[in-house]
Structure formats: C-alpha cells, structure tokens
Amino acid sequence: MTSLHALLLSSLLALTAHAAPAVPVIFDSDMANDCDDAGALAVLHALADRGEAEILAVVTNRKDVSNASAAAAAAINTYYGRPDIPIGTDKDGAKVPPGKPSSYAPALRDEFPHQALPDDQMPDALDIYRRTLASAADGSVVICSVGALSNLEDLVRSGPDAISPLSGADLIRTKVKNTVIMGGGFPRTASPETNIKLDPAACVAVVNEWPGPILWQGYEVGAALITGAELQNTPAANPVRRAFALRPFHDGFAIDHGKPSHDQAAVLLAVRGPEADLWQVIDKGRVISDSEGHTEWLRDWAKKHGYVKIRNSPRALTTLIGQLMSAAPKSAAGQP
C-alpha cells in the first residue's frame, strides 16, 4: 500500500468514526450557583464541534438574584460560535437563597459578548421545551437535566396549546429518546442531594409521571471526577475559564485545583450514552423520591429507570472531561 493510499484509508476511517448522526440535545441547567454548569455547556459545545451533538436549546431552572443565568449561558454559546441557540428561563423555578447571588453569572453577563436579556425577560422555559420538541423528529431528542426538576415537572404536566396539540406527556413519549438526570444519590441518599432538594415536589412528579426512559447519575459519580484546572491553559476570552476562576472552592477557586464534575459527566452520558468501558448501568428497578428530597433505588418492580456507576477507575472519565471542557472552539466568537 502506498503512503497516499494509507493516508486516504486513514481519512476514511476517521470520517466513518464520526458518521453517526449528531444527538439532538436540550440542556436544562441551574446556571447560577456552581460552575460545573458552565463546564458542562463547554463539554456539550466540544461534542457539537466534533459532530456528535446538536444543541437544540438551553433552558435554566434556577432563579438567581443576579437575573443573569440566561446571559451566562448565552455568553458561553457565543464564545463557541453558536449565539443563536434558543434560551428559556423558568420564571417561578427554584430560588437561590437570598443574599447568595451567583459568583460568576453577572461577570459572564457583563464581560463577554452575548444578546440575552435579563432572565425575567427571556422566553419561558416551558415554551422553549414545547416548541423545540414539537419541531423535532420523533424519538430523536435527548434531554440532559443538571439542576432542579421544575422544568421537567412543568413539561410533563403541560397540556395542549398553540405551540402543539399534544400534551407534555405525549410530546415526551413521541419526541424524546432518553432523559439523563444528574440528581440524587444511589442506591440511596443519606441526606437530600442539592438538585433534588431545590424542588422535591418536582422530583416526585418526574419519577412517577415521566413516560419515557430516565438514566440517573447520582452525586457520587461527579464527586469522584475532579476537573477544572485544565482551564488555566485556555484564553482569557473563555467565559468558562472565567466562571471557574470566580467560583470559590475550598481555600481558593475552582480553577486552582479543579472541583467535582457532576454536570460535565451528565452531558457526556447524554451524548455518548453509557459507554461500556466507562460506565456500569444498574437497571430493572426504579427510583423513588420523597417530599424532603431523598432518593432511593428499589427493585420491587421495573420502570424505564436506570442509574450509572463508574466502571473501574475514574481516571479515564476525568481525563476525557478535562480535555473536552478545555478544548478550543471550532468557531469561536469573532472568528470565521
């Protein structure tokens, strides 16, 4: 085989490896308190740059006193060259306790280019959900939820409207292929996990009423995956780097030594699925949740639920997430 033939074969194999269609994703985020939401959106853009994901919409599920969660997401989308991704906000969603505004959302709003309005002037998250699902191909969409489940509760309980003649449950049943939720802890929580505790009633509604499959990723997964220091090597123009530089963590900031990667891992799961060399899936059971926000895995009867555990060492996942989160954008803001 000549060197030219070898080069052509190598190129063909590379194209074949990425021949699978991009996974259409709705990213549902509490882009306020923790910077792993910013990191997760960076991972999602990196996967989109590789042709693995299509970002259909971003919705936020946590009200922040800065009113800047949508702007933070928009700044990241703009940096990665996708300023036109629809963004919606939950106007009556889970609230950050008074006096604790986001450590990074106002800075991303004020220091980076974007076209978002204040959260209370953005389109409603439920409308964005229903419009996005109504226009999607049947059985195609993956929802990745990494915050309060308020938007998911609103969606599953929504009725037909001017956007779609289908109820929310029927839209989910018809359009959603899978839903990945970062929340809770498995096989059971000793104390309520933050995302579930933000809106325990919403979690109860989702575990009981959601008509499609749900893959859960508990707190224990992200706690084992420490990333963020990799962002030190990215440009100052990167809003994700700025978010990690502003987020206090231990005796410094998240960018200094990294922090748990709960939301980044969930995005990776949503797009690539539970790859057998990285994940173990526990299924043939169901998740339950109570009014205080505890979660537990039961095997009394099987629903379309499962949860994941890291297979073997977390090192491979940590390395992968760090590489994706710090990857240079394919088409950044202001570049062709």
Image (cartoon, rainbow, N blue to C red):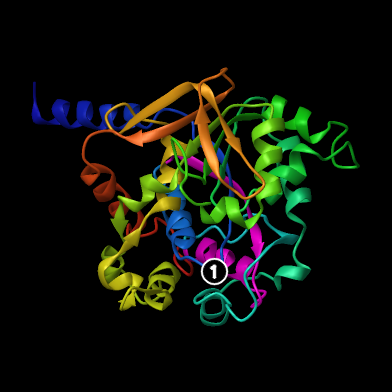
Query: What segment is highlighted magenta in the picture?
Result: 51-79
Q: Is residue 40 above or below residue 9?
A: below
Amino acid tagged 1: Ala
Q: Is 57 one of the magenta-colored residues?
A: yes
Question: Residue 300, position in %: x, y?
Answer: 55, 19
Q: Residue 217 location, x and y as percent?
A: 46, 40
Q: Residue 220: x, y in percent?
A: 38, 46
Q: Is 233 left or right of 214, judged from the image as shown?
A: left
The residue sitting at 35% across, 70% down in the picture is 254
Tell me which residue sits at (77%, 57%) in the image.
124
In the picture, the quarter occupied by the C terminus is bottom left
Q: Residue at x 49, y 51 (%)?
A: 191
> Looking at the picture, how far across and down is residue 142, in whole percent?
57, 36
Secondary structure state at the residue bearing disc 1: helix
Q: Is residue 131 visible?
A: no
Total numbered labels placed on residues in the image? 1
Q: Nearer the viewer, residue 165 or 6?
A: 165
**What is the quadrant of residue 313 in the picture?**
top left
Q: Is 3 within the magenta?
A: no
Compared to 78, does 221 lie above or below?
above
Quarter where residue 153 is shown: top right
Pick the residue in front: 152 or 23.
152
Bin the neighbour count of mark 1 within 10 Å (Cα to Cα): few under 14, some 14-19, many 20 and up: many
- Can residue 212 be seen by looking at this rendering? yes
Quadrant where the image shows the N terminus: top left
Q: Is 243 rendered above or below residue 139?
A: below
Left of 3 or right of it: where is 291? right
Residue hosting label 1: 75
Q: Is residue 285 above or below residue 279?
A: above
- Viewer-nearest residue: 202 or 253: 202
